[in-house]
Image: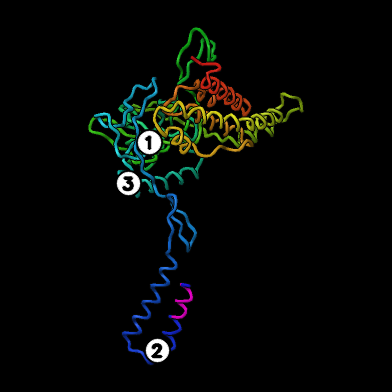
Amino acid sequence: TMRSMRSTTTTTTTCSTMALHPLTLMLLFLASMSIDFFYERTVQVSHGFTFNTATTSIHHHRSRTNHHQYVPPRHFNWILNLSSEDGTDNDEGDDGIDAGAADDYFMTSLKNRITEMKDNEDVPKIPLVVLDCMVPRQVLRVRLNDPQVVKVVRHQILNETPIFGMRGTMKVGRNGDSVGEEVKEVKLKKGVEVEMLQKPQFTEEGSVLLVVKARRRFEVISEVENKEKGWTDATVKYLNSKKEEEEELSRNGSNDDNSDQMCIARAILKAAELTTLISEWIELARQYEKRPGQIDLLLRDIGNVPPSTEPSERAFWVGALINPLPEMGVATGIRPQLLNADTAKERIDIACEGIKRSIAHMDKSDPLW
């Protein structure tokens, strides 16, 4: 109807050019342009998305919900409470930081910088900090007052590189096993590159409000303490699950049950079994939420479940699910073991065992503690 109106208006303007007053011609022309503009720009807003009917592009509107008090993991030494001092909730975004405080232009510039860096996989060195052990896809919303971390964050932002390396620690026995009577805490050789999702907020007390998401895994090749800057720089090798699994498949081996090819096949079959377990875990975990909406926010953070044909990625996803940040206390920690595992089968075995034990704990058939 709009196009026919525009066509009629245009025809009228053309046929009557010689008979109409110039002012009338101008008004008809403007009316025609207005109809065309309205047709091209008509939009429909539904469920938080904007649909441009002219281009069918989709834009997501940031939703704003109340943020409940952030309960820190027991092993954290930093201040993690982002609620107001009187204990009441703030009118802030899901991430605990005022959504309007983020400088969109600033963060867009930094994200472009990240894209440029990822085009070059051979990043020689990155700042490395020891915080919590994270696996890809996890989001950490935290307030830190560790001077070293604050320095790293400030330096990376000033240099328009909003990423740094993060690794955790793991308790091992005297012989290097993860269990044993005599244990010590060691730094993991594998970690993740984390990306700042929002512009950090530095406080007068010397702390920083930070929202980071775990991206690529890496293995530390070498590390050097940078005394001048006050932190450790590390040369890392980035790891890719797909390439690792392809290398397993390409290795020469027999057709026996222990060959790399058969291990990958079994990992894929076992990864498919996780589908039912994941649904069961989510249903049970909703009863153990530390704050309303915790599971929904967790699922938004980690995204969709990778397919079973990508067993390593599915295993990491399960680790992010059952060991969220902050911890829910319904599962044993499997993130360090997942990062240290060398094969797809090892990773999927760890994930399956972890989620099964968590389910048994929550349905009270076999409590963990």
Residue 208, x across and y down, in percent: 30, 33
For residue 23, which numbered disc appears in the image? Answer: none
Q: Residues within 10 Å of mark 2 (few under 14, many from 20)?
A: few
| The furthest residue to the top | 181
Q: Earlier in the sequence, mark 1 or mark 3?
A: 3
Picture quadrant of residue 297: top left
The question of residue 6 being in magenta is answered with: yes
For residue 17, which numbered disc appears in the image? Answer: 2
Residue at (42% x, 32% y) in the render: 294
Q: Are marks 1 and 3 in contact (CB under 8 Å)?
A: no
- Local SS, label 2: loop
Query: Which amino acid type is marked by label 2?
Result: Thr
Query: Which amino acid type is marked by label 3?
Result: Asp
Q: Please state the extent of the stretch shown in magenta in the rendering.
A: 2-8
Residue 27, x across and y down, in percent: 34, 80
Q: Is residue 365 above or below residue 264?
A: above
Q: Which residue is mark 1?
A: 211
Q: Which residue is mark 3?
A: 103
Residue at (29% x, 36% y) in the render: 90
Camera sees residue 210: yes
- Local SS, label 1: strand
Residue 35, x across and y down, in percent: 41, 72
Query: Which amino acid type is marked by label 1?
Result: Val
Q: Is residue 158 above or below residue 360?
A: below
| The furthest residue to the right | 255
Out of 334 and 160, give the one closest to the viewer: 334
Name the colouring of the figure. rainbow
Residue 339, x across and y down, in percent: 53, 27
